[in-house]
Image (cartoon, helix red, strand yellow):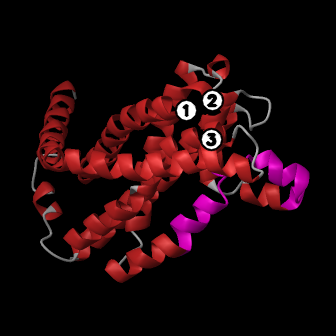
């Protein structure tokens, strides 16, 4: 058992390293792109929107939404890459010839997604501090909770990416997934407003419906960890629910992709 575990770990690490080689080639370009969109959004949210009547802490609220959103929005291009490979070169088929179970390939994919999320989180958090230092109330920031919820969000987005990819037969389907699933989940996922705003000011029934959106727990969780617990859903509820969603989406996605790959 120990020998097999070491073998699986070594295979996973070798696959991870091969992805790392490709990632290093594009990291500078990715950081430039990230700097451009992140700083543009944050400056507008923090300094322009409050002048138009938005609450003054909107920039502080959005900086942590955007940090989590970087991991979430990478789901879409990741789906494109995987489906393009399945319908094209089928490089993934080589991975299944290695001495390891099929699920390990997808676990590696999820782990590498988490790794990239951590790298870009360090960059976006640093950039957010530079842009908003005097606007962030650090007395409510919990480092431990932030790390826990961010890693859980990254795990969820990695599993959700596998799940969504399992339903896409071609690139056209991936476009539909982005427009019909990824975009709506974001706009109703408490990334741009607290969940309690819907509950208190609009409709409690609608608020409860939005609890079916896993992104609600991601955004409420990261805001609870960084801005305080009183105005957001309980932190540990968000963390636990996200872990359950991650397990569900990850298992279903891996099984569906295995079935699909067996027929190719």
Is mark 2 in CB contact (under 8 Å) with mark 3?
yes
- The answer, for residue 101, to whether it is visible in the render is no
- Is 68 on the left or on the right of 51, as rendered? left
- Check disc 2: other Cα within 10 Å, few if <14, some if 14-19, many if 20+: some
First-in-chain label (3 vs 1): 3
Q: Nearer the viewer, residue 45 or 190?
A: 45
Quarter the C terminus occupies: bottom left
Q: Nearer the viewer, residue 226 or 10?
A: 226
Residue carrying label 3: 59
Magenta residue span: 180-205
First-in-chain label (2 vs 3): 3
Q: CA distance from mark 2 to mark 3?
A: 8 Å
- Check disc 1: other Cα within 10 Å, few if <14, some if 14-19, many if 20+: some
* Residue 139 versus residue 258 in the image, above or below: above
**What residue occupies the far top of the structure in this picture?**
139
Q: CA distance from mark 3 to mark 1?
A: 8 Å
Q: Is residue 43 magenta?
A: no
Is mark 3 in CB contact (under 8 Å) with mark 1?
yes
Per the picture, the main secondary structure of the magenta-coloured stretch is helix
Residue carrying label 2: 135
Residue 171 lies, in percent from the top left, at 32, 78
Residue 94 lies, in percent from the top left, at 10, 60
Residue carrying label 1: 132
The residue positioned 67% from the left and 60% from the top of the image is: 188
The residue positioned 24% from the left and 76% from the top of the image is: 263
């Amino acid at each position: 058992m120990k020998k097999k575990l070491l073998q699986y770990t070594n295979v996973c690490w070798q696959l991870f390293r091969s992805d790392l080689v490709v990632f290093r080639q594009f990291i500078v370009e990715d950081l430039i792109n990230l700097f451009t969109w992140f700083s543009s959004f944050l400056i507008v949210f923090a300094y322009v929107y409050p002048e138009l009547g938005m609450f003054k802490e909107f920039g502080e609220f959005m900086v942590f939404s955007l940090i989590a959103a970087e991991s979430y929005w990478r789901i879409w291009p990741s789906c494109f890459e995987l489906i393009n490979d399945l319908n094209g070169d089928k490089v993934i088929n080589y991975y299944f010839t290695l001495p390891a179970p099929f699920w390990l390939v997808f676990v590696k994919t999820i782990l590498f997604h988490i790794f990239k999320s951590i790298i870009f989180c360090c960059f976006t958090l640093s950039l957010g501090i530079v842009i908003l230092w005097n606007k962030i109330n650090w007395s409510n920031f919990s480092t431990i909770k932030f790390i826990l919820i961010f890693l859980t969000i990254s795990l969820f987005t990695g599993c959700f990416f596998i799940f969504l990819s399992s339903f896409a037969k071609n690139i056209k389907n991936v476009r539909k997934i982005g427009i019909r699933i990824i975009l709506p989940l974001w706009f109703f996922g408490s990334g741009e407003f607290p969940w309690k705003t819907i509950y208190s000011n609009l409709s409690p029934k609608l608020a409860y419906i939005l609890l079916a959106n896993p992104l609600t727990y991601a955004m409420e969780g990261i805001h609870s960890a960084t801005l305080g617990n009183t105005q957001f859903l309980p932190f540990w509820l968000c963390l636990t629910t996200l872990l359950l969603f991650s397990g569900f989406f990850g298992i279903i996605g891996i099984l569906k992709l295995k079935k699909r790959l067996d027929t190719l």
